[in-house]
Amino acid sequence: MLSERRLEVLRAIVQDYVGTEEPVGSKALTERHQLGVSPATIRNDMAALEDEGFIAQPHTSAGRIPTDKGYRLFVDKLAGVKPLSSPERRAIQNFLDGAVDLDDVVGRTVRLLAQLTRQVAVVQYPSLTRSTVRHVELLALAPARLMLVLITDTGRVEQRLIDCQAPFGETSLADLRARLNSRVVGRRFADVPPLVQDLPESFEQDDRGTVSTVLSVLLETLVEETEERLMIGGTANLTRFGHDFPLTIRPVLEALEEHVVMLKLLGEAKDSGMTVRIGHENAHEGLASTSVVTVGYGSGDEAVAKLGVVGPTRMDYPGTMGAVRAVARYVGQILAES
Amino acid sequence: MLSERRLEVLRAIVQDYVGTEEPVGSKALTERHQLGVSPATIRNDMAALEDEGFIAQPHTSAGRIPTDKGYRLFVDKLAGVKPLSSPERRAIQNFLDGAVDLDDVVGRTVRLLAQLTRQVAVVQYPSLTRSTVRHVELLALAPARLMLVLITDTGRVEQRLIDCQAPFGETSLADLRARLNSRVVGRRFADVPPLVQDLPESFEQDDRGTVSTVLSVLLETLVEETEERLMIGGTANLTRFGHDFPLTIRPVLEALEEHVVMLKLLGEAKDSGMTVRIGHENAHEGLASTSVVTVGYGSGDEAVAKLGVVGPTRMDYPGTMGAVRAVARYVGQILAES
DNA sequence: GTCTGGCACTCTGCCCGTGTGAGTGCCAGG
DNA sequence: CCTGGCACTCACACGGGCAGAGTGCCAGAC
């Protein structure tokens, strides 16, 4: 087990390295922090920390930098979550309050998070699996052509075109619309299928085919749209990444553009509470030099989606975690109100 | 006026520079191209081209590189549009044919264009101003709370919540829905306002307020949503930009994220035909080192939106223009079919 | 046992001078 | 008007030398 002071040394190394972006040496450490011991002692501690794999030196006779494992220890044991200042809190609230619809909320959140953390922000749209149905609408565009519109409680609207085998009368349409709504409004997506299974039976022979088609399209929409969407912003912040540009940021940009990859990444994080994945802990190779801080957010107690930031492993963890948590809270509030 | 050969020299310089990314000298030129004259002669021609501002040298005694003005001349007079190979065409068609809805069409188009040109792709969603109304739906969510859903011929759906001053009966609602649709379906957005102006008068006193509110929300939606949306992809290609990274690509990334900026950029381009804006011809400062190739696309004869790519001024203009034009055509076809 | 000061050692980064090569401009002659 | 020749100019790569930061280790103090 590491002594108290050695942990303190690690903390100091992380802090200094995050601030200066340069390997930090024993002398500089004693100057900037009140450790109460001499550089020589620090050197011994550093050697121990290096043996344990928490820090490393880029070249012999350079200062030390934290390893992924070092950051991990720092995040788990040494760092708190730094709360935002109250002007910052106010700014967040003001900025988010202006949103007019769901796209706007997500868009503003992304920009906010990117600005606040000066990193790349990722915000997942509220997931449909956990949402409930607010309304199902059926329109006849032509005698044998319907449009299904699904409205969720998070304000999303999905539409699907349906070609029917046989014309479908206005009366039957109104009937189906009413019955559908009475059964599914307010329900969670996952709960819908059994509730509508027997609907076709209550219709006349001629209409049953169409009713079945409509139902299957509806269920398909519920499932399909579980593929969640996300919005990404602040990629310009990648330019502050490091000195050896192209090699580092190219794979990151590529990963960010592959929304599938990012969704998988978010999916691997805990549903509630904050998750920090550091460097190689990220499954995706392109993100090996980045850390990802994510947290779930939602309108009620339960998280309906996740948001987070992607930045260099050398990031200000307490600050970033504070910003991510705060933004998630406010977005949750906004969603609950609307 | 420049002699035939000097134009030929400029063309050769542009081609070589685009290929090698290095300043091109007189000797290398005579080796790679059959110009039929000696390096010394080329040098004279180069001096003349430099006097006219078409080429420049980064340092004394380095080769020449084209200036913005040089590229302009190249694009206007010297370069054709390089048609795609037929495998490429087939790939485009196959890839776009798989799209299931508008978002998917736009998403696939962006990815396609980015891959094909190896640059950043920008695709504007089909504009609402030029679209027509396919259906307007009114739903009662609560006695005094309506939802307006607007469906366009390009497959977009917009919804708005409306709080009414007074409860609005189901009969009146059906009435309003029917009258609205009979008047506006098939109309262009811009033509709608005069067509619905007198609607409130035909309703009973009690309902007039609500009808007016609904109309104003509808008109607002038509106008508001004229703010067009766009999708951007292929930003990872920016890493192939140049040697002096951060300074060059940072402003470009920033500009790309500001959709407002990009929309303005697209707006400045011609509505029909291809537009190429080279370097400083772009109003936005961050894009001074990029060229933007755009073209309108649409389901019919008329363009409903634009798409294009953003790349370094040193780009393969004929190839890029060919890809952009081809993609625009196929997207137009897809839109027309759906 | 633990901390400390001292010392020798090892690198990296920087500066500087040199040399080479690519490229130019100019000029005189075909 | 084209060409070959020639002198000139830089950017860039190479290599030595120097300074500085940082380390590891060891012997001695508390």
Image (cartoon, coloured by chain):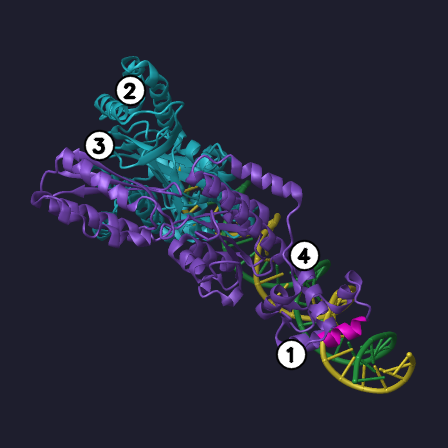
Chain colours: A purple, B cyan, C green, D yellow
Name the residue nearer the viewer: A56 or A58: A56
Whole-percent x, y for residue A131 in the image: 38, 49
Q: Is residue A148 above or below residue B187?
A: below
Q: Which mark is residue A51?
A: 1
Residue B11, how many percent across, how many down?
37, 42
Magenta stretch: dominant SS?
helix
Q: Nearer the viewer, mark 1 or mark 3?
A: 1
Query: Which residue position holds label 3?
Result: B300
Residue, disc 4? A19
Q: Secondary structure at mark 1?
A: helix
Amino acid type, callout 1: Asp
Q: Which label sits in the foreground, 2 or 4?
A: 2
Amino acid marked by disc 3: Gly
The secondary element bearing badge 2 is classed as: helix
Q: Quadrant of the N terminus of chain B?
A: top left
> What is the spatial separation of the Cα atoms under label 2 and label 3, in whole angstroms?
19 Å
Q: Residue drawn 67% across and 56% down?
A: A19
Chain assignment, label 1: A
Residue extent of the magenta highlight: A38-45
**Distance of mark 1 from mark 4, alpha carbons?**
24 Å
Q: Are marks 2 and 3 in contact (CB under 8 Å)?
A: no
Asked if residue A192 can be seen in this view, the reply is yes
B131 vs B287: above or below: above
Q: Position of residue A285 (x, y in %)?
A: 45, 65
